[in-house]
Amino acid sequence: MHQEVLDHIEEAKMLMDESVDHLERELVKIRAGKASPSMLNGVMVDYYGTSTPINQVANISSSDSKTLNISPWEKSLIATIEQAIFAANLGLTPQNNGEMIIINIPPLTEERRKELVKQAKSLGEEAKVSIRNARHKIMDFIKKAVKDGYPEDAGKRQEESVEKITTSFGEKVNSVIEKKQNDIMTI
């Protein structure tokens, strides 16, 4: 029974860890005014009838902090990639020069920066909800185990352990959000 409780706690930790990882992946998509190839991670291109990530049909690089260059592996894909970037609604305007697509990253206005911070905080709240759901699940399991004969004092210790784990993951989320907020607000 004790091992089963520990296994469930490990499983909850993994779920919490996945929540933080997911948050970090989502935050990469929020641009902070600097050109980064990862800004296009969510863009899918129609490649011969198959929805394909843009980085699998083109080379994406940043020539400086304000410019992204997209060189398709097949010139016939330029228009398709351009349409996919527009469709992704990233607020970016691709320019096609016949050889490659160039995206100039416009500087963010103060208002837009505040919107992006709100978006980041919202993603942080979603991650915290996910962490609390994992906590709730393991707490229910521990309470059920105590009812089924698991020692009550051991159950209390495990609950305290879960609370500490939950708090540490909540702090991790806060730290990730604070770092992104500073990144967004830095001109």
Image (tube, rainbow, N blue to C red):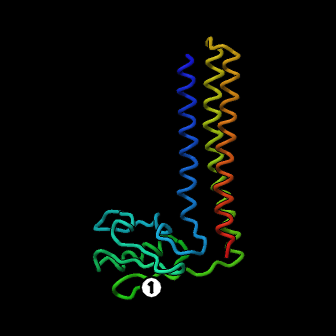
Q: Residue furthest bottom?
A: 97
Give the residue at mark 1.
95
Residue 97: percent from left, percent from top = 38, 88
Relative height, residue 9 to residue 177 (above, below) = above
Q: Nearer the viewer, residue 169 or 22?
A: 169
Q: Residues within 10 Å of mark 1 (few under 14, many from 20)?
A: few
Relative height, residue 5 to residue 164 (above, below) = above
Q: Which corner quadrant of the image does residue 155 belong to?
A: top right
Q: Residue furthest front?
A: 64
Q: Nearer the viewer, residue 157 or 83?
A: 157
Residue type at mark 1: give it: Gln
Q: Which corner quadrant of the image does residue 34 belong to?
A: bottom right
Q: Nearer the viewer, residue 86 or 13?
A: 13
Image position of 27 (left or right of 59)? right
Image position of 100 (left or right of 163)? left
Image position of 32 (left or right of 92)? right
Residue 84: percent from left, percent from top = 42, 72
The quadrant of the picture occupied by the N terminus is top right
Relative height, residue 131 to residue 68 (above, below) = above
Q: Residue at x 28, y 76 (%)?
A: 74
Q: Residue at x 61, y 13 (%)?
A: 148
Q: Residue at x 63, y 20 (%)?
A: 144
Q: Secondary structure at mark 1?
A: strand
Residue 181: percent from left, percent from top = 68, 64
Relative height, residue 36 to residue 27 (above, below) = below
Residue 142: percent from left, percent from top = 63, 23
Q: Residue at x 50, y 68 (%)?
A: 39
